[in-house]
Amino acid sequence: MFTPAPWRLITDTALWSENWPGIPRPARGEIKTRYTNCALCPAGCAVRARLVGEQPVALMGVPAHPLSFGALCPFGLTGHQLPYHPERLKQGPAHEAAEAVANAIAQCGPNERIAVLDLRPGRTASWTYRRAMAAVKNGVYLTAPPPLGGASVNLSAARTVLSIGVPVLEGWGTPGNVLAARAGFRLIQAEPFESRTAALADLWLRIKPGSGRALALGLTALLEGKAGPLTPAQAAAETGLSENQITDLARDLAHNGPALVLAGDDLPEAVPLNRLTGAWGESLIARAEAPVPESWKKAAPPTGFASVPDGSIRALIIDESVPGDYIPWNVIAPKLVPDNPVVVAIAWSRNGYGRHAQFTLPAAVYPEMTGDAPAAIDSPAAAFRIFTPLVPATAGMVDPAGFIASAAGMNASAALRERADAIHKAGRGTLFTYADAKSTPVKELKPEDFWKALNQGGCWMDAPGKPAAPVKYDEAAWQGKPPAPQEASDLPLVVALTGMPGAAGLVSPLMSKLYQESNLRLGRNRAALNPASAAACGVGEGSRAVLQTLLGRRPIQVTLSASTPPGVVEVEASPDILDICGAFSRARVAQS
Amino acid sequence: MIAANRNNKAKRYGMTIDVDRCTGCGACMVACAVENNVPPAHEGATERKGITWIRVFKVDNGEDYPGKRTVFVPVLCQQCGEDTPCVHVCPQQAVEVDPATGIVGQMPERCLGCRYCMAACPYHARYFNWWDPQWPAGMEKTLNPDVAPRMRGVVEKCNFCHGRWHAAKQRAAAAGKQEIEAGSYVPACVEACPAEAIHFGDLSDPAADVARRAKDPASFRLLEKLHTEPKIYYSSQRDWVRRIGDPPKPPMGEENLRG
């Protein structure tokens, strides 16, 4: 007992157990740094990767970057782990899919269409799809409707920001840019539930679910000073706010300008409201795009699902290789021809459209993929960044641009280089290089040096021009959202969607720190209920249950949360949930 | 104990967290896990059995709308400076305060897994490895070579990214310097915070930004009445937020019994 030997033995045993074969041992090697851009959302933040040998082991931001300011969100910080995600798609029937698409193109009738659905428009790959669809008989290029009429937002030009349900502080836009501009504006969040943005806003206005339109119309009537479709009193009744609150809000927008109103793509009423506040043409400006080669301009225009007749799409190819706006399947399905439509999804996993597609083909995940990021919604000038692969792509991956181009008989393998040359030829703007944090005018660079710098971690930014008013928003052409389900008495709960809508891509298993090991965010297939609502539904903490809406049902696991209001069920906006309900749909939770 | 280098003035590394800037995004949590080779959750892990060296809590003022206000509070090992509770109770001397840095270190190879330290820690900032660390096949290639994964049955906690401290020491030594330059050593959470809410540095250096922030009248520490002298300072311009540092004693049965 008094001899040190047994104690020493314990320590040695512990040391041995630390190295037993079950414990992974980190690889050793030369430490290197590489730069690229994040492909996980349209923000395309600058990334500094730490590598051991050729293997990335950590991702960080680039502090001097003029758009992302060194910030990366949790998804971006763990992006280097995605290639090893257990749910990742690693193989798929590429030849069979190509053959089926070729047959569909050959057999396409006069009233039928061949369509490409692009979840993240504006990329060089998007231009390839548009060119391909122009080359194919009855080709259609489909995208989700652009929010705010396709305008860019200049947050630093606003002093008051009214956000109608936009997750401004939860990953909307470029996180670093939003947070850098945050001190300069007063944020008013109009939202039924206390989201993170609502919690952090200077003022949170709790409006009734689905009453964003009424608020916008009430404010429009007050700012115009004449009767509109809704009087302020009617708007107050619909939103649950007092008439005084709406009047004060209108006064704020009128007198504490420049004021900006942010809203999602489902609220076109925000566009006239922004004209009245003076934001249109000032803090809301035309979305500038990086130059493209002249020969690309004969391309199919972006189209919304509303413009496509029901039962007309013979073949639909969906590029899901970069996460973007998810259009619910119940919007897409009626547009397909009734007899044997061909649906091909090119994706990272089967969690999105792969659940519905006839062929699901594997795509390279970030950081294996090559591509580019156009300017984000909060970038006042055009930008161009390249995702340079940090690790070689796994064998058997399908390049969506290559697949679609070859279906149209095109070769687009050099599209990125052609685009970079077109930008260089335009001679505008500067190139910011990440390794040395230097900005160089494009005019001073040779085309080869420009291309090389873009591939080694660089960002081209256009010269700031005079703000131009955004193009007219054609609501009818873009409407593609499912109709709001009718009220049903046996569906007592209101759905509150959390997380970034349409985040159909994979997330690192390490995100369990947020989703499972803490209660910071709701995980996939988990639903939060107030304890009183849960008791009324007959479910408790951890219960396996079913979320039932008018459009279908999904299995969920219940989490009790006192911060969820009674009568509300909070669920993550994952594709399988979005397929059965939109925001503020009615739902029921029952034990499974 | 590790002897302080007599040629160098002992440092007192600490952190300030501006709660008013924290957006609750969780970037600090995942950056910490990436840096320190903390594995993804075992399927049986819950918010009590998970390992989150830094964890963001959502705290509100207890009122209903329209008076309701919410903040996000990142909580990590508070790096107690006096009468460090976990050091006192460890039967294995697996917990030590480094006199050269003031960092409370945890040595998993000495830990027996008795979890006395977890019971003693008033901040619930210590975590037990209930399962062997496991990464999905292939993901072990992404482990940080500067940090050894811990085995099942031991306790772990924030150590201000000790691997980064060693790397900074090596860089300083390679440059012929005895001391780490201010700013050349920052923990992963500080580097990752997109809101720049977390600041880090030597609290004993009056010229350091973190020392100035710690002395700000808006700053406060958690459970100051325990006199554990934490080196994590929070700050908020709001009175009710500053009061969460010293909450009333919770009723019986509501304490966190993690572990």
Image (cartoon, rainbow, N blue to C red):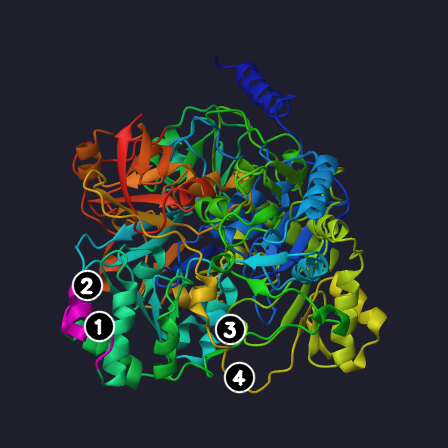
Label number found at residue A468: 4
Circle 1: residue type: Leu
**Kind of residue indicated by mark 2:** Glu
Q: CA distance from mark 2 to mark 3?
A: 30 Å
Callout 1: chain: A
Tell me the SS state at disc 3. strand
Question: Which three-letter amino acid code belongs to the residue tagged 3?
Answer: Ser
Earlier along the polypeptide chain: callout 3 or callout 4? Answer: 3
Which residue matches tag 1? A230
User: Is residue A190 visible to the viewer in this orientation of the structure?
Assistant: yes
- Do the residues indicated by labels 2 and 1 lie within the same chain of the protein? yes
- As shown in the figure, which amino acid type bears the numbered disc 4? Ala
Residue A319, position as x, y percentages in the image: 62, 50
- The residue singled out by tag 2 in the image is A238
Q: Residue at x 15, y 75 (%)?
A: A244
Q: What is the C-alpha distance between the residues marked 4 and 2? A: 35 Å
Kindly indicate whether the residue at mark 2 contacts the one at mark 4 (C-beta within 8 angstroms): no
Q: Which segment did they paint magenta? A: A227-243
| Chain holding disc 2 | A
Pick whichever of labels 1 and 4 is earlier in the sequence.
1
- In depth, the one of B256 and A437 nearer the eye is A437
- The crowd level at tag 3 (other Cα within 10 Å; few <14, some 14-19, many 20+) is many
Q: Are marks 2 and 1 in contact (CB under 8 Å)?
A: yes
**Residue A186 locus on image (x, y percent):** 34, 74
Which one is in front in this view, the residue at disc 1 or the one at disc 4? 1
Determine the image quadrant of residue A529: top left
Separation of marks 1 and 4 at Cα, in angstroms = 30 Å
Q: Which residue is mark 3?
A: A152
Q: Do tags 1 and 3 sit on the same chain? A: yes
